[in-house]
Image (cartoon, rainbow, N blue to C red):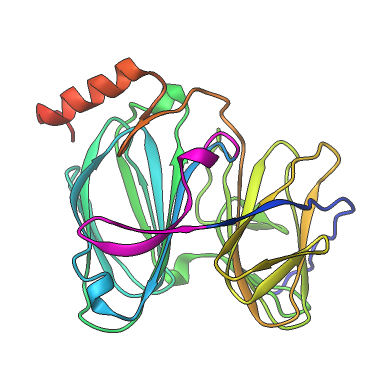
């Protein structure tokens, strides 16, 4: 799909650049934690962003065996590789190249994500999106979107945009959420290209560059770096440019402005709700 880019007048700039922290999760999967607890209030409603990329099976083959979640949504975007999802609500799916898995943990779910490959590249991202207080105990929900089901468009400058959530330049994404209004774009800029998209002033937003280098309002954001976009009531958009081939995620959402109390895989609004989550999980009350 080709579309005309809507050029806005007041682009956001870069507030600061963040380097992720190398860590491991699950059964030893090596990854980079880009967004963690110290940024949760600043980037509300987003709680976590992990990036994983390796062609060494020892880095990923054990995957993420059964583990619980409550109170938020997980969004897994796979660039390369195959990951099998199973959960206690009876859902099962295979996430492959270009596909997205969107899961609402709600009142509680136990799931696993296990690679279905023994060699080759495994690359992708997992984003945690907070749920508003009235929705934290909703029934768990899950959907797989194969790569071909993710809407895309190409600008006259040859910029390819995959619209996972929200909308960009008139193209509606695969997922919409009323309260947090997430925007999730995967943007591929060829060398010398520029790209603009509308961005609500009230949204918190960031980019994560995973190939090349992007320039925003004169500031360069290198590969494997997050650029937190400045908040300004006058800004109505963001504009990127790239000297060389560049790929990045643009993620934005409307803040909930609610207390965030996290204990591992449980994210609620009060300590009492965390105690209840632990009790429910230990007593087998998750879906």
- The residue furthest right is 9
Q: Vertically, is 201 above or below 249?
A: above
**Which residues lie in the magenta part?**
20-42
Question: Residue 119's x, y, as percent?
Answer: 25, 83
Q: Nearer the viewer, residue 22 or 251?
A: 22
Please state, as top left, top right, bottom left or bottom right, where the N terminus lies in the image.
bottom right
Question: Residue 96's x, y, as percent?
Answer: 34, 71
Q: Is residue 179 left or right of residue 147?
A: right
Residue drawn 66% across and 82% down? 245
Please state, as top left, top right, bottom left or bottom right, where the C terminus lies in the image.
top left
Q: Is residue 232 left or right of residue 164?
A: right
Q: Is residue 30 left or right of residue 46?
A: left
Residue drawn 38% across and 47% down? 74
Q: Is residue 259 visible?
A: yes
Q: Is residue 186 visible?
A: no
- The residue furthest left is 283
């Amino acid at each position: 799909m080709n579309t005309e880019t809507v050029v806005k007048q007041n682009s956001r700039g870069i507030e600061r650049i963040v380097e992720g922290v190398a860590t491991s999760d699950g059964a030893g999967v090596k990854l980079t934690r880009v967004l963690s607890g110290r940024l949760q209030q600043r980037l509300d409603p987003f709680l976590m962003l992990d990036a994983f990329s390796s062609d060494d099976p020892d880095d990923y083959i054990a995957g993420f065996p059964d583990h619980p979640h409550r109170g938020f949504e997980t969004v897994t975007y796979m660039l390369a590789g195959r990951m099998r999802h199973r959960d206690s609500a009876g859902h099962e799916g295979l996430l492959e190249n270009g596909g997205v898995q969107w899961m609402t943990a709600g009142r509680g779910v136990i799931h696993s994500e296990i690679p279905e490959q023994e060699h080759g590249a495994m690359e992708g991202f997992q984003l945690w999106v907070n749920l508003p207080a009235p929705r934290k105990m909703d029934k768990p929900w899950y959907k797989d979107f194969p790569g071909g089901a993710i809407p895309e468009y190409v600008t006259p400058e040859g910029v390819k945009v995959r619209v996972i959530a929200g909308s960009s330049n008139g193209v509606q994404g695969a997922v919409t959420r009323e309260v947090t209004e997430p925007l999730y774009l995967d943007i591929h800029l060829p060398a010398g290209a520029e790209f603009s998209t509308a961005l609500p002033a009230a949204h918190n937003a960031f980019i994560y560059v995973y190939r090349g280098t992007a320039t925003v309002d004169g500031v360069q954001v290198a590969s494997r770096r997050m650029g937190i976009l400045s908040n300004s009531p006058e800004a109505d958009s963001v504009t990127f440019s790239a000297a060389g081939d560049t790929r990045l995620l643009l993620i934005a959402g409307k803040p909930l402005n609610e207390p965030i109390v996290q204990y591992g895989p449980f994210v609620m609004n009060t300590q009492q709700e965390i105690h209840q989550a632990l009790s429910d999980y230990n007593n087998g009350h998750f879906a």
